Image (tube, helix red, strand yellow):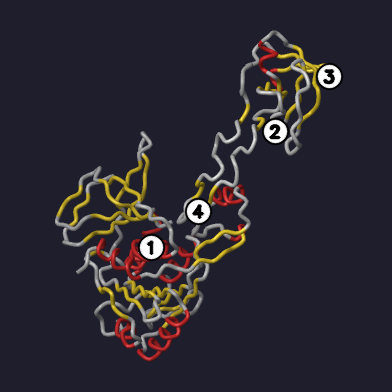
Amino acid sequence: MLTPAEADVLIGQHLQCLPIESLPLAQCAGAVLRENIYAERDHPPFDRVAMDGVAIDSRAVEDGARTLRVQATQAAGDAPLSLRSPGDCIEVMTGAVLPAGCDCVIPVEDLQAQEGRVTLGAGARIGAWINVHRRGSDTRQGTLLVQAGSSLRAPEIAIAASAGMARIRVSSQPMLVVISTGNELVEPGEPLLDHQVRRSNTYGIVGSLREHGFQRVADDHIPDDPQALQDRLHFHLQTHDVLILSGGVSMGRFDLVPQALERLGVRTVFHKVAQRPGKPLWFGVAPSGAAVFGLPGNPVSTLVCFMRYVLPALRGSLGRSSVDPERLALGEAVTVQPPLTHFLPVRCQQDDWGRTWALPAPTNGSGDFTSLAATDGFVELPPGPNTYARGFVTRFFRWS
């Protein structure tokens, strides 16, 4: 069987990079940038007043002047004024252009104003460029501000706006469908018999996809009927970029998904990974280029495989820059017996020193998904047999 790392490589080799579209800036939150953003001009683009107060020529004050005549007022957004005389000052507002002939701003709390004049307080700091945000001190024109592959959060959106970009090139949203299989599954709210269970896996996956910015997400439920399964899968392969199936990929009599996909021309890239939970994980590619993930049906296995493989792969298809998973130290020793990579649910806890530890919170088997509500994610432990001591540092995957 493949290792998880080998499965990662194969998925990355076969998942297509999504096309690029140009969108208005206001519609790009959460998207992945597919072009570099450069500074339109110096930032700040002028010597900028950093405090409300008065702008002065510091040399005049250093020569002994302490009371100055207020010549005019310079507001933010107004064209710059010019200081007429070293014995004058100009009232200025935060964000305004520093008036010509001035090189220092005295804040209002260090001033006494009376009848068109101001007197500088004894504690006022005087000197060149005090309380002035110098032109180009943040970035120079042409500086790379945001690199292609970045996710567009609030800071990146604001930076793009500051660079004058009304539209930006981003990855197109993929067409995704989440599919559950099985006769035993019943929708929430529908009547339920004693031998049936609620359809829950797809709701968890769809919720996570939407939480992570994927908007074009459909879902479907297909019973354990070979012809119905083949017909519905054929439709989804023609209309979606990625299919995410839950259930039907193990070795049971009614695990019909691999055979149905094979009849539809979907090439199996791998089936089974040396891991627990989630050993039956299946991945393949259709002639159309659509990628198909077949996740095991047990709820813990489904969510773990989705977070461990599907979500990172989808981010990669968007052209997102690769981000290494978090790493956390175990808060308790853990023994792994099987020669399989072990995914262990944990909850995060900080100690008195501010250090975060991963405290094991094992489930009661791969069907015990209710216990996941008290966890923050899961860690990936190497195959056993081995005992990993408290403080062992390993990869950590958050649920959100």
In depth, the one of 342 and 285 nearer the eye is 285
Q: From what the image shows, is residue 28 above or below residue 195?
A: above
In depth, the one of 105 and 310 nearer the eye is 105
Alpha-carbon distance for marks 3 and 1?
72 Å
Quadrant (top left, top right, bottom left, bottom right) of the N terminus? bottom left
Secondary structure beneath label 2: loop
Q: Which residue is mark 3?
A: 116
Alpha-carbon distance for marks 2 and 3?
22 Å
Q: Which residue is mark 1?
A: 370
Alpha-carbon distance for marks 4 and 1?
43 Å
Specify which label sits upstream in the sequence, 2 or 3: 2
Q: Which residue is mark 4?
A: 36
Residue at 38% across / 80% down in the picture? 181
Secondary structure beneath label 3: loop
Percent position (x, y) of residue 8?
Answer: 30, 63
Density class for disc 2 (Cα within 10 Å; few <14, some 14-19, many ≥20) is many
Residue 266 horizontal side relative to residue 275, left or right: right
Alpha-carbon distance for marks 4 and 2?
29 Å
Density class for disc 1 (Cα within 10 Å; few <14, some 14-19, many ≥20) is few
Residue 176 horizontal side relative to residue 45, left or right: left
Residue at 76% across / 12% down in the picture? 67
Q: Which residue is mark 2?
A: 97
Percent position (x, y) of residue 14?
Answer: 34, 71
Q: Check the image and name the residue furthest to the bottom.
A: 227
Residue at 75% across / 36% down in the picture? 79
Percent position (x, y) of residue 287?
Answer: 37, 81
Alpha-carbon distance for marks 2 and 1?
59 Å
Tag 1: residue type? Thr
Tag 2: residue type? Val
> Mark 4 or mark 1, which is nearer to you?
4
